[in-house]
Amino acid sequence: MFKDLRAGTKFLILCVVCLVLTSVATYALLLEKQIAISFARSELVGSKYLSFLRPIYAAVLGAQTNTALGVRQNGSEAQSIDSLLRADIETAGTLHIESAVKSLASALHYLDTSNAASISTDDYLTALKNLREVAARIGDDSKLILDPVLDTYHVGNIVVARLPAALEVLGQAQLLTRAAKVASDPSERMAHLIAFDTLLRANLDEIANDLRVAQRGNPDERLKQVLDPAVTSFATSARTYLDSLRTFVGAATENAAQADMSYAAAVTGALAAWDIAQKQLDQLLRDRIDGLSRQRLVSLIVIGALGILALLTALLTYRDMIVPIRRLAELANNIRETKNYGLRFKHESRDEIGGLAAAFNEMLGELSTAREREIMSQTEIARVSRLTTMGAMVASIAHEIRQPLAAVVANSQAATRWLDRKEPNLEEARAALDGIGDNGHRANEVITGISAMFKKNSDRRVPVDVNEVVNDVLNLSRGELRSRKIALHMKLASDLPRISADPVQLREVLLNLTMNAAEAMNTTAENLRALGIASMLETGGVKITVEDSGVGIDPKNAEQIFEAFFTTKTTGMGMGLAICRSIITAHDGRLWATPGNSCGTIFHVALPTGANRDVDHTL
Ligand SMILES: Nc1ncnc2c1ncn2[C@@H]1O[C@H](COP(=O)(O)OP(=O)(O)OP(=O)(O)O)[C@@H](O)[C@H]1O
Ligand SMILES: [Mg+2]
């Protein structure tokens, strides 16, 4: 079905399919980029809300030391709590941390009091646990630790899980300096210390490991330059703190000043490392968003350029191929209907269509020339045919009126002689003049008859008695036969039906045959000269035979004798038999010759009783 469609329709379908496919591909590409950008933006949101946890950590952990924490955090813990409580609304459903933050807030009620001694250990530990849970929740909701990208995943892990866990362990370990609050038994305290030591050192190793992996995906080594020193510094201060804590627990003294100082340094180091890690994470995420936006823009530009190129190609193809081919087809149809080979395909270009147009026009030129030649040759054929017909007619008339003209001349000479006598014989002169008149009439009839022969549909046929025509002919040629000393033998059938014929033409046929017979006997001995004319009945018509005792016909000329201008006589035209056969054929009859019974020739004329009237007369 597709192959039956017009080229323009196929082209349109192809363009639409291309457009749809390109649109789908573009949409898929943009969607993919948009999803990646949204993912990174969500992570940025998570990172922002994680930063609100640092002042709270500073406040909670600071409550367990008499040494001031040397870290300055943005905003107060109360403002941070407020910001976190608004997170669900402000992030439009990205974060769902309200209930966790509320639990944290209730655990932090002691922060309102300035007396650190009044803080219950349970509240303190719950606050630390809640802080870590909020951090983890923010990480989950904002997909920070679902991020599959190498550099940000591991930095995110440090920010979301590792450092909050380290801070929690630091906070828990610091309780050992408050002996009464944890365990009064020294060995139990040592056991706690070993557990915290193991946890913290494992945590420090994990942070170092995450950082190492993150740096692999960070070719510009910014992480190494910025984050590495902060993490190392924190690890050093954390280990120092663990050492001083061991000294404190081992000495079993009440003086925790050294441990407090190391604790403050470790917490400060952790918060500083967290701050730097988070800023690096933000930077990486922003870089990624910028990269994705750039890629999206480049993709759009490339696809747009391809689209414009495709559109341009489509337009050019339509303008330079589809339209000219359609015009060519229309022109071909027009030429087929009008046969106007003078039309031309107007298209100027050097491409294949231009070549096609030139070839088409060249073909039209040749067709036009051939057509002109054909018309000319048809005209020429018609002209030649008319001339041939005219020539044949003239030749026939010339042949047939020779005899009446000769009679006219002979009669006029006779009349002159009768009148030139001393005593003019008026009787004979009148007879000769009558003869002139008769032969003049005959000549006229002959001309009319022959003209009729060459006109189609001329209707001069009447029922004819063949014997009457034979007698007419003999009356006309009696003088000629007598002068040539030819004996006449007649055998006419009496019961012949009339036939439909032109009597003048039939008379000319029999007269020609009689004259030929007489001429054929020129060299025959006078006593042997005989002309036999017979008529007889035949199936479906009548037959007339004209027999002579002349020289006969050379068998090699048997058929040629009926051709126009064939003659064996020095003064002959060779038209007699050609005219005869033409007339007889037009009457649906047959004319042929056979050798005579002893010598000479017999000409046979067979005519049907009813003849066809619509026949061309050609010689
Ligand atoms: N009765 C006949 N016997 C022998 N030959 C004949 C006879 N009738 C015709 N022919 C041959 O046929 C030829 C053609 O005859 P046709 O009547 O057509 O022309 P033609 O008699 O030669 O000249 P014309 O045109 O003056 O009659 C003759 O030249 C002659 O050779
Ligand atoms: Mg003749």
Image (cartoon, rainbow, N blue to C red):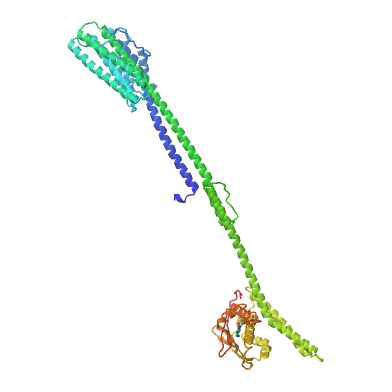
- Percent position of residue 248, x then y: 22, 9
Q: Position of residue 24 (x, y in %)?
A: 42, 37
Quadrant assignment, res 169: top left
**Does residue 409 appear anywhere in the picture?**
yes
Q: Residue lying farthest front?
A: 570
User: On the picture, is 222 further left or further right than 176?
Assistant: right
402, 556: nearer the viewer = 556
Residue 89, x across and y down, in percent: 38, 22
Q: Where residue 311 appears, x then y in whole percent?
A: 49, 39
Residue nearer the viewer, 575 or 540: 575
Q: Is residue 618 above or below residue 422?
A: above
In the displayed structure, does residue 313 sit left or right of residue 123? right
Q: Is residue 143 above or below residue 440?
A: above
x 62%, y 63%: residue: 376
| Residue 48 location, quadrant | top left
Above or below: residue 79 compared with residue 412: above
Q: How many marks?
A: 0
For the C terminus, the quadrant is bottom right
Residue at the limit of the structure toward the right, as seen here: 422
Q: On the rendered structure, is 359 left or right of 137?
A: right
Tell me where residue 484 sits by quadrant: bottom right
The answer to whether any part of residue 92 appears in the image is no
In this rendering, the answer to whether 346 lies above or below 50 is below
